[in-house]
Amino acid sequence: MSIRIAPSLLSADFARLGDEVRNVIAAGADLIHFDVMDNHYVPNLTVGPLVCQAIKPHATVPIDVHLMVKPVDALVPMFAQAGADIISFHPEASEHVDRTIQLIRSLGVKAGPVLNPATPLAVLDHVIDQLDLVLLMTVNPGFGGQSFIQGMLPKIARARALVDAAMQRTGRTIWLEVDGGVKRDNARAIAEAGADTLVAGSAVFTGARDVAAYQGAISAIRSEALHGAARAALEPA
Ligand SMILES: O=C(CO)[C@@H](O)[C@H](O)COP(=O)(O)O
């Protein structure tokens, strides 16, 4: 299994966003995770489509837009136009979850729901076969730098089983992404539970804030996660 690392720009230097995007990509980032907060669905306010459009020329890897906004649908075409390659959204913030997924996919963008720590996996029941990814929050959304909620590990494992079954049924690829409190010292357990895509903000944008620092952080997380994924592959199904 391959592991994707998605640095969250929430912890980047917003005064130098183009440089930060280029630097984390040079350091090995597989995706750029772009957190959109509206001070309504979550108690924080970040950036919108104009900033996504501004970083697009610097992003030689896919831009993974995480919408923490309510309502959702009106912003979807704006982010598609701004260069989003992936758009995830919170089912609680959408009036019609199936419609939102179809809207995102109709614009040629990969789609997936984001499950808060307390959101049950049952929300996937009738849509999983249409998804490109499932994003599991391992902190409550709204802020970077929070601690990983340990109780989420069994939820990741249960989501892995659902995603595997859906991939077998449909022949599609569905990523299982985890976001919140991901560090080098828990990446192994997170990947062993079944995550294949790890978002990390404060654990990546750290140290001297240059390519070497980002490379050290990304490769440490990746290497731990690869160990975890290898261990999971050895375990009986
Ligand atoms: O969506 C969010 C927070 O709502 C995340 O993407 C955080 O930005 C991750 O930051 P760290 O927990 O890795 O510092």
Image: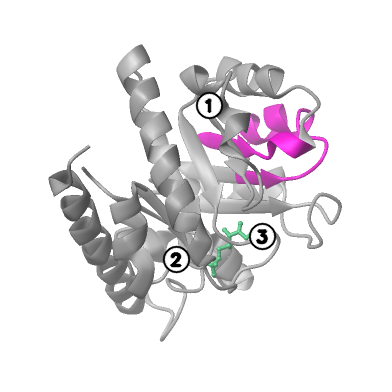
Q: Is residue 126 magenta?
A: no
Q: Earlier in the sequence, mark 1 or mark 3?
A: 1
Q: CA distance from mark 2 to mark 3?
A: 13 Å
Dot 2: few (<14), some (14–19), or many (≥20) neighbours within 10 Å?
many
Q: Tell me residue 134's x, y (percent).
A: 50, 37
Q: Report the image quarter containing ligand 1.
A: bottom right
Please state the horizontal and vertical placement of residue 110, each as a whole percent of the image: 50, 28
Question: Mark 1 Cα within 10 Å, few/some/many (few <14, many 20+)?
Answer: many
- Residue sitting farthest toward the right: 40
Q: Which residues are magenta?
A: 66-92
Tag 3: amino acid: Asn
Residue sitting farthest toward the bottom: 208
- Nearest the viewer among 163 and 132 is 163
In the image, residue 53 sits, relative to residue 23, either above or below, namely above
Q: Nearer the viewer, mark 1 or mark 3?
A: 3
Residue under the point 66% across and 18% down? 98
Secondary structure of the residue carrying numbered label 1: loop
